C-alpha cells in the first residue's frame, strides 16, 4: 500500500499506526507516540500525503484528573472549525477506555485534495484545563514510478517548464540493457553539494553529475532554501505566540513599533477593547503594553494588536488554581427520617465540586439538594433511609474528602400499653394503646391470628392512639390479644378474661368521691389554656361499685365519643381532653359521678387565652415637615390577657418593605412617627401585644404625606388706594417645601381690632390682588397667608395701617429717553411708541400733530390707565412732524413734544460734467440732488467705464464734496462717469451720467519685437507605457502593447526570447502615433516566453519586455494525448 510520506528530515522513519486500531489498506496514520505534555497522551504529527489517498490523525487525552468529559475541537488554520465540515470528506470518531480513563479522538480525511494542505490544530478543553497542539499536512501530486537514481529525473528538458526549449523524445527510444558493474556506485547527495556551492559553480557540478536540466535544478534549489520570514513595516517586535496566566493574576502583552507616534488598537476576539480598570494601555516610546488585571475565564481568548493594516496575533490561556478542601467532611449518624447535611469548605469562592456515592455522581433531584454559599458547599438529604447508608465523597480539582453516613432505625416509644381485661358476658371490651409516632400503623392479633373487623369488632387509629373494641363479649372472645406496629420489632400484648357469674354476692358499696386538684393553676377550679394547645385534665374517682361519670358544659353533656372535645373514662380515672383549644371552648364545666351509694359533683372554669385581635381604625391625625401623628382604636378582644402595648410599622406607598418604628412596646394609642421624607406618601399598621404574643397586623392606614406649611409671604406693600379698594403686592415665601404653594388668602381688619375678614374665598395664584368693598375713610390692616396641602402658613402682616381714601396725584408724562431727541425711521418701517404717564384720578389724554388735532387714519392711538401708545404700521414721509401729547386732570396739564422724521433714499445728482483732463487724470463736478430723502446727504459714489469694455469700476466711495479727480486712467482710452447720491438710507436708486467724456491721449512709444527662437524637440526614445506580463489561453488571439516617445521617429524592433520576430504571418506589428501593438494570432503552447520591444533613433535607444504565458485547457490536452 502507498504510505504517507514524512518530511525530508524524517524520510527513514515509518509511520506507525496505533496497535489497537486497524485501518483500511489505503489509510495511513501520521506520527507515533508523542512526548507527554498537558492533557495529551498522544498528539497528531505533521505528515505528507499523496493526493487521492486517505489519512487519519489520532489524539489521546488523559481524563483521570478531569471532573467532566473533555471537549475536543479540530481546527484548520486559526479559526476554521472542522466540526461544521463533517461528512464524506472529513470524518470524526471518538472512543473511551474505562480502565485507563483515556479518550481517543480520530480525524480522517478521505481522498485528500490539494485544498487540504496547510496547518491544523487540535484543542482539548475542560472546565479548568486546556491544551492544544499543531501539525502540518502537505499534499503531493501522484507521481509515476521513476528510476532509483534521482539524477535521471532531470535528463528530460520537458519537465522544467513550457518554455524550456525543444522537446526531448529520447525517452521514447528503445533502451539498451546496461551491463551491471561489479563495483557499486558511491551514494552521493548532489543537493547537499549544491546547497553549499556558489551559484557560479552550479553549471560545473551539474555537468559532473550528468544533470542536463539546469532550469529545473534552479527551481528545486529555490524550493529547498529556507524562506525567511517577511519583516514587518510596523512592528519591531510582535506579540508572543501565546500567554499563560493564573486566574485572578495579572498578565501583560508587549509590542515594539517602528514609529513611536503611531496609534494602535487592541482587539479581543475581533472586538476592540476600551481602556478601563481591567484593561490598562501603556505607551512608553515605541513600546506599547496591554495589561489585563484580575484575569478570569472570560479573558481566555484571542487578542490582536492592530497598527494600520498590519496585525499581530496571540492567545491568552487562563489557568484556574487548584481548589483545596479547607474543611473536611465529618461522619454523620442519624435516625431514619431525619435530615442529613454533609458540609465542607474550599479555598475558592464559586468553585465547582462533585459529590459522589458508590462511584455514582449525585445531582440535584427530589432526594438530594446541593447548596453553595461562598466557600461553603453542602449536600442535603431531606429524609434519611436505610438505603442511604454508605461513604460519601466530595471532589475538587485539588483534593477530595469523604464522610460516612450511618442511619439507625427509629425507636418507637410506648406511651400507654394495653392492659388485661376481665369482661362479663354481653359487655364491651376495649384494648387501647398510645405510641410516640402518629404515622405508625399496626395490626391486631388474637392468639397469633390477625383480627379482622366485623359487626362486633371495630379497630380505630386516631393520632397516636390505637383501639380495638369488642361489643357483646362472648366466651370465644377470650384469649391473648397483641398489637404489632408495622416496621418495628415491637409488640404489645394483653389478655381478655371472660367472667361467667354463677354465684350471687352482695357487692361492697362506697359513695363516689372526686379527687380534683387545680392548685397549680393559680386560681381555685380555674384552668387557663393557650388557644391551639391541648388540654388534658385527669380526675381521680373512687367509689364502690364503680361510679358513672358525666361531664357537662352548662346543660350540655360531653359524650365519650371520639372527637376534639371528649371524655376518656377508666376504672378510677376520668380524663377531660380538648384537642387544639379554641375560644368557644371557654366556659363553666362540671363533673358528676354517681353510684348506688351516692353522688359527688365538682365545678371548674376553663379560660382560653389567645393573642389579641388586631387594632382597628388606624388613621393619620396630622403631619409635619418630617413627622406624622398616628392614632388607632384598641382591639375589640384582648385575647383574655391584658394588652401590654403596641408595635408600629410603616412603609412607602407602593413598596412591600415594612420598617419597624419601635422595638419596645408602646402603651398609648397615639404615636408620633418621625424621620420621614417630606413629600413621600406613607402607610402605617399597628400590632397589639399581650402576655400570649403579638396579634395580626391591623389594616393599613390611608396614605398620608409628611409635609409642612410654607413660610410666610414677604414684602407685603400697597400699590394703589381708592375710595373703596386697595391694591396689594407681595413676594412668595422664602421656604416653599415639597407641597408647593396652592395660592394666597388676603385678610383685612380695622386698626385696633382682631376680627380678620377674608377678602377672597378661593386662593389666588398671582402675587397681586385688589381688595374691593372696603369702608371709605377707615384705617385698615392687611395680611397675606400662603396655602398648600399642609394648610395655612404664618401670616405676613403690614406693620402700618392704610387709610382707604383716594390720593390726588398731579399728571406727569414720563417720556422715554429715545423720544427726547428726533425720532428717525425709514419709509416702510413700523413705529410703536409707548409713553407712560401718571396721575390720579385717571387723566384725559390728547394727541396733536404740528399743533392740529391728529386725524390721520393710518396713525393709531391706544390709551390705558398708565400709558398711551402711538403706532404706525407702515411709515410714510407724510408722517414726519412734531407730535404733541397732553395729559390733563381738571385744570392741571402736562405736555411733551415728539419729533418724528421719516427718511427715504435720495434722488440722483444734477449736471455731472468732466471739467478738465490732464495727463492720466480727469476732474468731475456736479450739483446736489433735488430730493435729499428728507435728510442730509452723507456722500457720493463715483464710477468710471471705458468705451471699449463698458465695465463700471468704482473710483470713490463716500465722497463728501460735489467734485472729485479720477486718477490712474489708461492712456488711449475714452472714459465716461456716473455718480450716486448717498444718505443714511443708502445709495440712490437712480444714477446721474456725465454729459461729456474724458479722452486720455497717447504718447509716442515704440515696441521692439523679440526674435523667434525655435524649440529643439529632439529626444532619445523613451517608453511612456511598458509591456505588461500576460497569461492567455491557447487558441485565442491576443495582443501586447506599449507606448514610446522619440524625435526623430524611432525604429521599432520586436523580439521573442531575444530573437527578432521577422515577417512571420502569425505576428502583426502596428504603430499608431507612438502606441506599439504586437498581435499574436491563435497562440500555441510554444508561443509563450519573454517578449521585448526596442526603439532606436540617432539619439539613443530604449527597451521594455514582458512575459507571456500560454495555458492549455485540460480537456484539450487529454484529447491530444489520447490521439497520440
Image: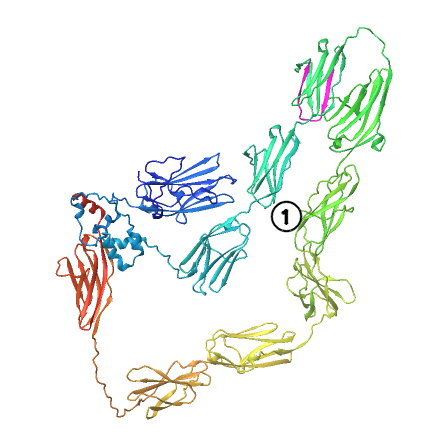
Q: Position of residue 863 (x, y in %)?
A: 58, 73
Tell me which residue sits at (83%, 18%) in the image: 594
Picture layout, residue 1077 above or below residue 1011: above
Q: Nearer the viewer, residue 192 or 483?
A: 192
Assign a secondary structure to mark 1: loop
Q: Position of residue 1046 (x, y in %)?
A: 20, 71
In this rendering, would 1002 be left or right of 511?
Answer: left
Q: Which residue is mark 1?
A: 655
The image quadrant that residue 746 belongs to is bottom right
Q: Quadrant of the C terminus?
A: top left
Q: Nearer the viewer, residue 381 or 226?
A: 226
Q: Quadrant of the N terminus?
A: top left
Tell me which residue sits at (66%, 51%) in the image: 681
Picture layout, residue 195 above or below residue 490: below
Secondary structure predominantly adopted by residues drawn in magenta: strand
Please rate how many residues cluster around mark 1, counting C-alpha atoms within 10 Å: few if below 14, some from 14 to 19, many from 20. Answer: few
Q: Position of residue 519 (x, y in %)?
A: 85, 30
Residue 382 seen in render: no
Q: Residue furthest front?
A: 182
Picture layout, residue 427 above or below residue 147: above
In this rendering, would 544 be left or right of 445?
Answer: right
Q: Residue furthest top?
A: 502
The number of numbered discs placed on residues in the rendered structure image is 1
Is residue 807 one of those drawn in magenta?
Answer: no
Is residue 444 one of those drawn in magenta?
Answer: yes
Identify the magenta region.
Answer: 428-446
Residue 206 seen in render: yes
Amino acid at each position: 500500500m502507498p504510505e504517507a510520506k514524512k518530511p525530508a528530515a524524517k524520510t527513514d522513519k515509518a509511520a506507525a499506526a496505533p496497535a489497537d486500531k486497524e485501518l483500511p489498506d489505503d489509510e495511513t496514520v501520521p506520527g507515533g507516540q508523542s512526548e507527554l505534555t498537558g492533557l495529551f497522551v498522544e498528539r497528531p504529527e505533521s505528515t505528507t500525503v499523496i493526493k487521492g489517498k486517505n489519512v487519519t490523525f489520532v489524539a489521546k487525552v488523559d481524563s483521570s484528573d478531569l471532573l467532566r468529559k473533555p471537549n475536543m475541537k479540530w481546527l484548520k488554520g486559526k479559526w476554521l472549525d472542522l466540526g461544521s465540515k463533517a461528512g464524506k470528506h472529513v470524518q470524526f470518531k471518538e472512543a473511551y477506555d474505562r480502565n485507563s480513563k483515556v479518550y481517543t479522538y480520530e480525524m480522517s480525511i478521505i481522498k485528500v485534495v490539494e485544498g487540504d494542505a496547510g496547518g491544523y490544530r487540535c484543542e482539548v478543553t475542560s472546565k479548568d484545563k486546556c491544551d492544544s497542539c499543531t501539525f502540518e499536512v502537505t499534499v503531493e501530486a501522484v507521481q509515476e514510478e521513476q528510476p532509483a537514481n534521482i539524477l535521471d529525473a532531470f535528463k528530460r528538458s520537458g519537465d522544467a517548464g513550457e518554455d524550456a526549449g525543444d522537446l526531448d523524445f529520447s525517452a521514447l527510444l528503445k533502451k539498451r540493457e546496461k551491463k551491471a558493474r561489479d563495483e557499486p556506485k558511491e551514494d552521493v547527495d548532489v543537493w547537499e553539494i549544491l546547497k553549499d556551492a556558489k551559484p557560479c559553480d552550479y553549471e560545473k557540478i551539474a555537468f559532473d553529475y550528468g544533470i542536463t536540466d539546469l532550469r529545473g535544478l534552479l527551481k528545486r534549489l529555490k524550493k529547498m532554501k529556507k524562506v525567511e520570514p517577511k519583516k514587518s513595516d510596523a512592528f519591531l517586535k510582535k506579540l508572543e505566540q501565546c500567554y499563560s496566566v493564573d486566574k485572578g493574576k495579572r498578565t501583560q502583552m508587549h509590542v515594539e513599533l517602528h514609529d513611536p507616534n503611531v496609534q494602535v488598537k487592541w482587539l479581543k476576539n475581533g472586538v476592540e477593547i476600551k481602556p478601563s480598570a481591567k484593561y490598562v494601555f501603556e505607551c512608553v516610546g515605541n513600546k506599547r503594553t496591554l495589561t489585563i488585571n484580575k484575569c478570569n475565564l472570560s479573558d481566555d481568548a484571542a487578542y490582536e494588536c492592530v497598527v494600520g493594516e498590519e496585525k499581530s496575533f496571540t492567545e491568552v490561556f487562563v489557568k484556574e488554581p487548584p481548589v483545596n478542601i479547607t474543611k473536611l467532611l465529618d461522619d454523620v449518624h442519624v435516625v431514619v427520617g431525619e435530615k442529613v447535611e454533609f458540609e465542607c469548605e474550599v479555598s475558592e469562592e464559586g468553585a465547582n465540586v462533585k459529590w459522589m456515592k458508590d462511584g455514582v455522581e449525585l445531582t440535584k433531584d427530589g432526594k438530594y439538594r446541593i447548596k453553595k454559599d461562598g466557600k461553603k458547599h453542602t449536600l442535603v438529604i431531606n429524609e434519611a433511609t436505610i438505603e442511604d447508608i454508605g461513604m460519601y465523597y466530595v471532589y475538587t480539582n485539588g483534593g477530595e474528602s469523604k464522610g460516612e453516613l450511618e442511619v439507625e432505625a427509629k425507636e418507637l416509644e410506648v406511651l400507654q400499653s394495653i392492659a388485661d381485661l376481665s369482661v362479663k358476658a354481653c359487655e364491651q371490651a376495649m384494648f387501647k394503646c398510645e405510641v410516640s409516632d402518629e404515622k405508625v400503623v399496626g395490626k391486631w392479633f388474637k392468639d397469633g391470628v390477625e383480627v379482622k373487623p366485623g359487626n362486633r369488632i371495630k379497630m380505630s387509629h386516631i393520632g397516636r392512639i390505637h383501639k380495638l373494641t369488642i361489643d357483646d363479649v362472648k366466651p370465644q372472645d377470650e384469649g391473648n390479644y397483641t398489637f404489632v406496629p408495622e416496621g418495628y420489632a415491637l409488640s404489645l400484648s394483653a389478655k381478655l378474661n371472660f367472667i361467667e357469674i354463677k354465684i350471687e354476692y352482695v357487692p361492697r358499696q362506697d359513695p363516689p368521691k372526686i379527687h380534683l386538684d387545680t392548685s397549680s393553676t393559680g386560681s381555685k377550679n380555674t384552668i387557663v389554656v393557650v388557644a391551639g394547645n391541648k388540654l388534658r385534665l385527669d380526675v381521680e374517682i373512687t367509689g364502690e361499685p364503680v361510679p358513672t361519670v358525666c361531664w357537662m358544659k352548662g346543660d350540655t353533656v360531653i359524650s365519650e365519643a371520639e372527637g376534639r372535645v371528649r371524655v376518656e373514662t377508666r376504672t378510677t380515672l376520668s380524663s377531660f381532653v380538648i384537642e387544639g383549644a379554641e375560644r368557644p371552648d371557654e366556659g363553666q364545666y362540671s363533673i358528676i359521678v354517681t353510684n348506688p351509694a351516692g353522688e359527688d359533683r365538682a365545678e371548674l372554669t376553663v379560660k382560653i387565652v389567645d393573642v389579641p385581635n388586631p387594632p382597628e381604625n388606624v388613621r393619620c391625625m396630622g403631619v409635619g415637615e418630617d413627622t406624622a401623628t398616628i392614632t388607632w382604636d384598641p382591639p375589640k378582644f384582648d385575647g383574655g390577657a391584658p394588652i401590654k402595648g403596641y408595635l408600629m410599622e410603616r412603609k412607602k406607598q407602593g413598596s412591600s418593605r415594612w420598617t419597624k418604628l419601635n422595638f419596645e412596646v408602646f402603651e398609648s394609642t397615639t404615636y408620633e412617627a418621625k424621620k420621614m421624607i417630606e413629600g413621600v406618601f406613607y402607610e402605617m399598621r399597628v400590632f397589639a401585644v399581650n402576655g400570649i404574643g403579638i396579634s395580626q397586623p391591623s389594616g393599613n392606614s390611608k396614605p398620608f404625606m409628611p409635609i409642612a406649611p410654607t413660610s410666610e409671604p414677604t414684602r407685603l406693600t400697597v400699590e394703589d388706594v381708592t375710595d373703596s379698594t386697595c391694591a396689594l403686592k407681595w413676594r412668595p415665601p422664602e421656604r416653599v417645601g415639597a407641597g408647593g404653594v396652592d395660592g394666597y388668602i388676603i385678610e383685612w381688619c380695622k386698626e385696633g381690632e382682631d376680627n380678620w375678614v377674608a377678602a377672597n374665598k378661593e386662593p389666588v395664584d398671582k402675587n397681586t390682588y385688589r381688595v374691593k368693598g372696603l369702608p371709605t375713610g377707615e384705617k385698615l390692616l392687611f395680611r397675606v397667608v400662603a396655602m398648600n396641602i399642609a394648610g395655612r402658613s404664618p401670616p405676613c402682616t403690614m406693620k402700618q395701617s392704610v387709610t382707604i381714601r383716594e390720593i390726588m396725584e398731579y399728571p406727569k408724562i414720563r417720556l422715554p429717553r429715545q423720544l427726547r431727541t428726533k425720532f428717525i425711521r425709514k419709509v416702510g418701517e413700523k413705529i410703536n411708541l409707548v409713553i407712560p404717564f401718571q396721575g390720579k384720578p385717571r387723566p384725559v389724554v390728547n394727541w396733536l400733530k404740528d399743533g392740529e388735532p391728529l386725524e390721520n387714519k393710518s396713525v393709531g392711538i391706544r390709551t390705558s390707565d398708565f400709558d398711551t401708545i402711538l403706532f404706525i404700521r407702515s411709515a410714510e414721509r407724510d408722517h414726519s412732524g412734531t407730535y404733541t401729547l397732553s395729559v390733563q386732570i381738571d385744570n392741571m396739564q402736562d405736555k411733551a413734544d415728539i419729533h418724528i422724521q421719516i427718511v427715504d433714499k435720495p434722488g440722483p445728482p444734477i449736471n455731472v460734467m468732466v471739467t478738465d483732463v490732464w495727463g492720466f487724470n480727469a476732474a468731475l463736478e456736479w450739483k446736489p440732488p433735488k430730493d435729499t430723502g428728507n435728510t442730509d446727504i452723507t456722500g457720493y459714489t463715483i464710477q468710471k467705464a471705458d468705451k471699449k469694455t463698458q465695465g463700471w469700476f468704482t473710483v470713490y466711495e463716500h465722497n463728501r464734496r460735489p467734485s472729485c479727480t479720477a486718477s490712474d486712467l489708461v492712456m488711449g482710452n475714452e472714459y465716461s462717469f456716473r455718480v450716486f447720491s448717498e444718505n443714511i438710507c443708502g445709495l440712490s436708486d437712480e444714477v446721474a451720467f456725465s454729459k461729456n467724456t474724458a479722452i486720455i491721449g497717447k504718447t509716442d512709444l515704440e515696441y521692439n519685437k523679440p526674435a523667434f527662437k525655435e524649440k529643439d524637440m529632439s529626444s532619445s526614445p523613451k517608453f511612456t507605457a511598458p509591456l505588461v506580463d500576460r497569461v492567455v489561453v491557447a487558441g485565442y488571439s491576443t495582443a501586447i502593447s506599449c507606448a514610446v516617445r522619440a524625435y526623430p521617429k524611432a525604429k521599432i524592433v520586436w523580439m521573442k526570447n531575444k530573437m527578432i520576430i521577422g515577417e512571420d504571418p502569425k505576428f502583426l506589428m502596428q504603430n499608431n502615433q507612438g502606441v506599439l501593438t504586437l498581435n499574436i494570432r491563435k497562440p500555441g503552447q510554444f508561443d509563450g516566453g519573454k517578449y521585448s520591444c526596442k526603439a532606436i533613433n540617432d539619439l539613443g535607444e530604449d527597451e521594455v519586455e514582458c512575459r507571456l504565458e500560454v495555458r492549455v485547457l485540460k480537456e484539450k490536452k487529454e484529447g491530444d494525448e489520447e490521439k497520440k
